[in-house]
Image: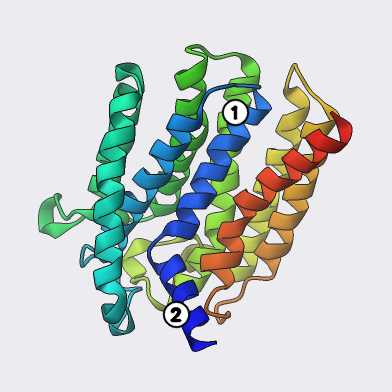
Amino acid sequence: MKTLKSIFSFYINSSIHVALAIAALVKLTFLKFEILGGNTYIYFSFVGAIVAYNFVKYANISKLYHRRLTKSMTGIKIITSVCALLFAYFGYQVSLDTWIYVFPFILLTILYAAPVFPNKKNLRSVSGIKIFIIGATWAGVTAFIPIIYAEGSFGIDMIIEIIQRFIFIVVIMLPFEIRDLQYDGKELETIPQKIGITRTKVFGSILLVIFLLLTAFKDDLYSTEIISTVAITIISLLFLWGTDKKQSEYFCSFWVESIPIMWLFILILMQSLLG
């Protein structure tokens, strides 16, 4: 039992789970727009997410990770190094145009973690923008770039999808902001710090209503799209209102980060049942 717990902890702490969530959202985009042949980009985004998240978490920047992780750091360094090599391998296979669109998000990730600004600041420490940087990065990597990767142009449905993806990521980040109240300095001015936990949940609920209503403005709207969007809205709402400052160890890092994976499975299920 102790061994299984150690394996699970390593799975979470090495960012494999969050990388799966990102890969799930990329696959979701391909399925929604019936884009074929995107597996290389899925692998590219998966290993890239592991490298990026481990860089952000373990570059002596975040206060959220404690001495208890030192025992597994060797394994995390190894898996990060292997993923960096795989990122280069899959990066060689994607087009130059894809790299052009990926580069700003790589730069944003570096600026998010590295103290390159005056007074040794990074983007994460800039008041009030952390959650929106993450939302923009995830929306870019999982919706904007996959569409460019396959289609090369945008229609109204694609623009709406990118906006929805940004809103969705911001909402599922709110439980993390609530959890991190005990760690984040007041200078960060996160949403829960500024308006409190209850109002943060209300704010997230309003965003979810907008997220859901935007679906109605799509030109090509299928029952699978409607049902899966309604389902994930309800699931996200339940997790948002189930969040508290004091929560179980893996509530956010496993369950909340599983919501994108749930969304993919729901869409696949709906497509298999309804065609």
Residue shown at the point (52%, 69%) measured from the top left: 178
Image coords of residue 144 (percent x, y)? 48, 27
Q: Which residue shows up at 46% across the image and 19% down it?
A: 148
Q: Quick one: which residue is furthest to the right in this view?
A: 274
Residue highlighted by disc 1: 30
Counting other residues with Cα less than 10 Å from the Cα at mark 1, is it few (<14), some (14-19), or many (20 or more)? many
The percent coordinates of residue 130 (x first, y second) are: 39, 53
Closer to the camera in the image, 192 or 233: 233
Instruction: Tell me the mark number nearer the camera, choosing from 2 and 1.
Output: 2
Q: Position of residue 249 (x, y in %)?
A: 52, 79
Q: Specify the quadrant of the image occupied by residue 94.
A: top left
Image: 271 above or below 126: above
Looking at the image, residue 229 lies above or below residue 237: above
Rendered view: 238 above or below 93:
below
Residue at point 33% right, 84% down? 68
Find disc 2 in the rendering and name its residue.
6
Q: Residues within 10 Å of mark 2 (few under 14, many from 20)?
A: few
Figure quadrant of residue 230: top right
Question: In which quadrant will I find the N terminus?
Answer: bottom right
Q: On the image, which quarter does residue 125 sit in? A: bottom left
Q: Is residue 121 visible?
A: yes
Does residue 194 appear left or right of residue 175 in this picture?
left
Foreground pick, 56 / 81: 81
Separation of residues labelled 2 and 1 (CA atoms): 34 Å
Label located before the other in sequence (2 or 1) = 2
Tell me the residue at 43%/45% (across/down). 46
34 vs 214, nearest the viewer: 34
Q: Secondary structure at mark 2?
A: helix
Badge 1 element: helix
